[in-house]
Image: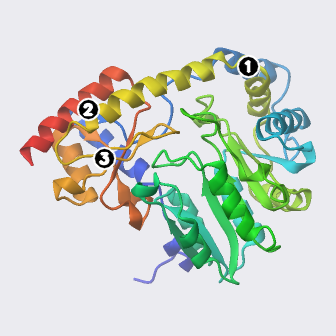
Amino acid sequence: MVSIFAKRMETLGTETAFEVLAKAKALEKRGKDIVHLEIGEPDFDTPNNIKEAAVKALHAGYTHYVSAAGIQELREAIAEYISSTRNIGVDPEEVVVTPGAKPIMFFSMLALVNPGDEVMYPNPGFPIYESVINFIGARPAPIPLKEEKDFRFDLENVQEKITSKTKMIILNSPENPTGGVLTREDLKALADLIVDKDDVFVLSDEVYSRIIYEGKHESIASLPGMKERTILLEGFSKTYAMTGWRLGYGVMPKDLGQKISQLMINSNSCTCAFVQMAGVEALRGPQDEAEGMVAEFKKRREIIVSDLNNINGVTCRKPRGAFYVFPNITGTGMSCNKLSDFLLNNAGVAVLPGTAFGQYGEGYLRLSFANSVPNIKKALGRMTEAFERL
C-alpha cells in the first residue's frame, strides 16, 4: 500500500520517555506496581503564587489573542531576569515567548538552517535536536559527550567537525541526560573558535540553568561577541514545575526575533495569555519554593548515586546539574535497550536506555531522580535484586 504520509514524516523522531511511560502505564493497568524514573519533570506542584496569578489573569480578561512575540510585561520581566543572571544587556524586543521551549529549537533551525547545512549537537543529548535537524533536511553532526570528560565536549573534536557547511552549534548545560555542566573555560574555548564565523549561530539550551548543585551556571551568551550570535533558550517547566503550562522563550538578536515571531503567527498565533501572566509572577515573585526544590533534588542525588554505585556492574558519576543520573552499565554485559526492558518487565522500574539520547548513549541508562526518596529507594532496591538475577 502506498503511504499517504509526506516523506518528511519519515525523518521525524520522538521522545522515548513517552513511549516507555505508555508501556509502564499499560503494565500498571494490568496490576503491576511501577516506579517511574523515566519522565523528566519535577514531582513538585507549581507554587501557589504562580497558580493564583493565572487565576487572577483569567478573571482580569487575559483570555484573548496577544502579541505573537509575547505580552510586553512578560518580555520585560524576562529581559530583566536574563540581564541580571547572564550579566548582559537584554532588550524586551530581543525576547520571543513560545508555548514551551521546544518551539525555539524548531523555529530557530527553520529560520537559520537550509537543507544540506550542518548542525552540531550534543550526543547523548535531548532527542528533539537530532529529530528537528533531520526533519528540516540539514545534516546532523553529533558532538560525542564522553564520561571521562565528565560528559563535557572535547574541543578538538568540535574543531574537527566544523566545516564551511556548519550553520549552528547546539549546546545544553546543565545537560539532559547526563547532568554534565559546561565550564566557562569550555565555553570560552568554543567561542574563540567561532566568534569570527559570521554565519555560525549557537543555540544554547539553558532550561536547567537554575538546577545546578556545584558552582554557578555559565552561558556562552555572556562572552564577548557571542550575544549577537546566540539564541538563548529558556523556560519555566523545570525551575517552577510548570511542565503542563507550556511556557518557554528565546533571547536572540532582534532581526531573528522578528522571523521567529512570523513562525509563531503561522503556527500558534500566540502563547496563552493568562499563562504568560503566571510567568511574570514566576520571575518576579518569591523564589523560595524553586530554591527548596533544588535543595531536595540535591539530597536525592546523593542517595541515588550512592545506591547505584553499590550495584555490581554499575558505576555512576555524580551529576552537577539537572535531575538525572546516567549510570554506566557496561559491566552487566547487556545492551542498554535490553536492560531497560528487563528492569521494566522484571523489576517494575521504568528507566530509559542511553541510546534514546543518541548513538553515544550505548552502555548507559538514564534515571530521573524527580521522584520521592521512598520511591527512589524502592526502585534501587528492586534494581539491586534484579541485577543479582542477571
Q: Nearer the viewer, residue 132 or 88?
A: 88
**Sequence-first tag of 3 and 1:** 3
Q: Which mark is residue 55?
A: 1
**Looking at the image, is mark 2 or mark 3 nearer the viewer?**
2
The amino acid type, in three-letter code, at marker 3 is Lys
In front of the other: 171 or 257: 171
Mark 3, residue position: 23
Q: Position of residue 289 (x, y in %)?
A: 61, 18
| Residue 165 in the image: above or below residue 125 | below
Residue 197 screen position, x and y as percent: 79, 74
Coordinates of residue 150 in the picture (x, y in percent): 46, 51
Residue at coordinates 62% horizontally, 56% vertically from top-left? 186
Amino acid type of the residue that numbered disc 2 sits on in the rendered structure: Ala
Alpha carbon separation for disc pair 2 and 1: 37 Å
Mark carried by residue 379: 2
Viewer-nearest residue: 323 or 342: 323
